[in-house]
Amino acid sequence: MISAQAQRGQLRAAVVRALKAYGIRSVLKSKIKGNNQSVTGNLLRSISSSKYLSSVRVQSNVDKQTGIISNVSITVAPPWGKYGQKLDSDLGSPLLAQGQMLPDRGVIRAWMDRKGIFYDAEVKVKVKAKNTGKEYTYVYNGNNSSARNMIAYNIQQDIIQNNRLRTRYPYSFELEKELSKVFNVAITNWFEVIGVNLLFDLDIEIASRI
């Protein structure tokens, strides 16, 4: 029987082949676009990168009697970069933030225009005068450029204060479920190739970054 290190190396190669066949880059693009989110700029460049393949880690225990690895743990960092992680329900949490988000208001405004956000709504803005303390209320129609600028500002401040995006989806959760099935097949096939038929525990983790 080959060494445990060699077994892990062979198994990792099988996992990488399975990951390529799964097409995680296409899957990510499809999932993100399916939620009406844009795959452009840095996010597109990150997803198009192949760096994620070097992030695949395979860990396991070794049965002392047989010398065969067991309890396999696989870690994969999806190719979505820092911005992509912010779109995820779990990895986009402020607790996992690597730094302060400072979004550009012009980018937010362009995003609003592209998606048609608040075009049919009225916007009320309350302003308090510093010298008198009196509060004034202004009402803008949603089609008004000043209203959209104000909304973009409020979104920008919300992101900065909370250090997260409000609109997030469970991408990592979905990927873990799908990859668990893919890797289970790959591992089972690999064990059959080396002539071993045994039950094993498999743990899949979506890492926070490459």
Image (cartoon, rainbow, N blue to C red):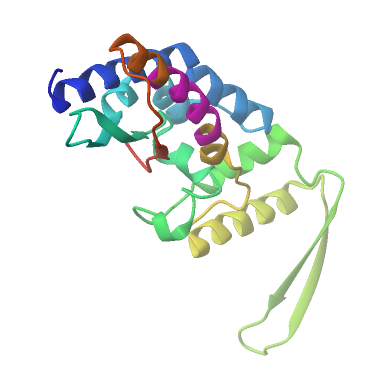
Quarter occupied by residue 199 = top left
- As drawn, is 20 to the left or to the right of 34? left
Quarter occupied by residue 5 = top left
Residue 7, percent from left and from top: 21, 21
Residue 181, percent from left and from top: 52, 26
Viewer-side residue, 1 vs 202: 1
- Against 141, residue 119 (above or below) is above
- Against 79, residue 130 (above or below) is below
Kindly give the residue lying farthest to the bottom in the view shown.
132
- As drawn, is 195 to the left or to the right of 151? left
Viewer-side residue, 37 vs 14: 14
Question: Does 183 appear in magenta?
Answer: yes
Magenta stretch: give its range.
176-187
The count of marks equals: 0
- Against 44, residue 94 (above or below) is below
Q: Residue at x 73, y 86 (%)?
A: 134
Q: Residue at x 33, y 34 (%)?
A: 72
Question: Does 131 appear in magenta?
Answer: no
Q: Residue at x 80, y 72 (%)?
A: 137
Viewer-side residue, 141 vs 68: 68
Q: Residue at x 41, y 19 (%)?
A: 188
